[in-house]
């Protein structure tokens, strides 16, 4: 099992990749590590934060996809009718865009630091974009 450290704003989380359920998505994301970006609050989906990736084509299709990620689950939308993006649910999420409901590949789950999900979500909502860093750990 691969363990990943996620530093978002002032918070640190640890998680595991969903290698059995989403092997292609995990493999593509691992090639990006360490991955540094900004995370912002979602517009349409509810209690979530996202990393917009525009028209980035990662060569992925759907696997282990959902429109309703649970708090602490990261999904990657591979693009198509809306832009490519990564979303983290911190509460109730119905994944969507202005074009309607979407589904993203659940590829990473936070296992430690869940108590800081809501504070991170509220920080992105009220204070704006937060730095986020994904990196492998032993």
Image (spheres, rainbow, N blue to C red):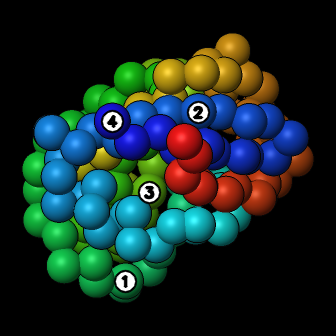
Q: Disc 4 vs disc 3: which is toward the camera?
A: 4
Query: Residue at image x 11%, y 50%?
Result: 63
Quadrant showing the C terminus: top right
Image coords of residue 15 (percent x, y):
50, 33
Q: Disc 3 vs disc 2: which is toward the camera?
A: 2
Label located before the other in sequence (4 or 2): 4
Q: Is 6 left or right of 108, judged from the image as shown?
A: right
- Badge 4: residue crowd in 10 Å (few <14, some 14–19, many ≥20): few
> On residue 56, which mark appears?
1
Residue holding disc 2: 14
Residue holding disc 4: 1
Query: Residue at image x 69%, y 15%?
Result: 115
> On residue 74, which mark appears?
none
Query: Circles 2 and 1: CB distance less than 8 Å?
Result: no
Mark 4: secondary structure: loop
Image coords of residue 2 (percent x, y):
39, 42
Residue holding disc 3: 86
Q: Residue furthest front?
A: 138
Q: Choose top left, top right, bottom left or bottom right for residue 78.
A: bottom left
> Can residue 5 be seen in the rendering of this structure?
yes
Q: Whole-Å distance between the Cαs marked 2 and 1? A: 26 Å
Q: Whole-Å distance between the Cαs marked 4 and 1? A: 28 Å
Above or below for 93 versus 83: above
Q: Residue furthest top?
A: 115
Q: Choose top left, top right, bottom left or bottom right for residue 1.
A: top left
């Amino acid at each position: 099992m691969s363990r990943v450290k996620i530093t978002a704003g002032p918070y640190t989380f640890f998680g595991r990749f969903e290698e059995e359920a989403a092997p292609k998505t995990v493999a593509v994301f691992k090639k990006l590590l360490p991955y540094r970006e900004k995370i912002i609050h979602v517009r349409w989906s509810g209690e979530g934060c996202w990393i917009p990736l525009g028209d980035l084509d990662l060569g992925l299709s759907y696997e282990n996809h959902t429109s309703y990620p649970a708090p602490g689950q990261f999904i990657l939308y591979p693009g198509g009718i809306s832009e490519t993006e990564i979303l983290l649910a911190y509460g109730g999420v119905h994944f969507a865009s202005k074009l309607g409901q979407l589904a993203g590949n659940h590829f990473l789950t936070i296992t430690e630091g869940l108590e800081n999900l809501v504070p991170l979500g509220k920080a992105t909502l009220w204070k704006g974009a937060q730095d986020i860093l994904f990196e492998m750990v032993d």
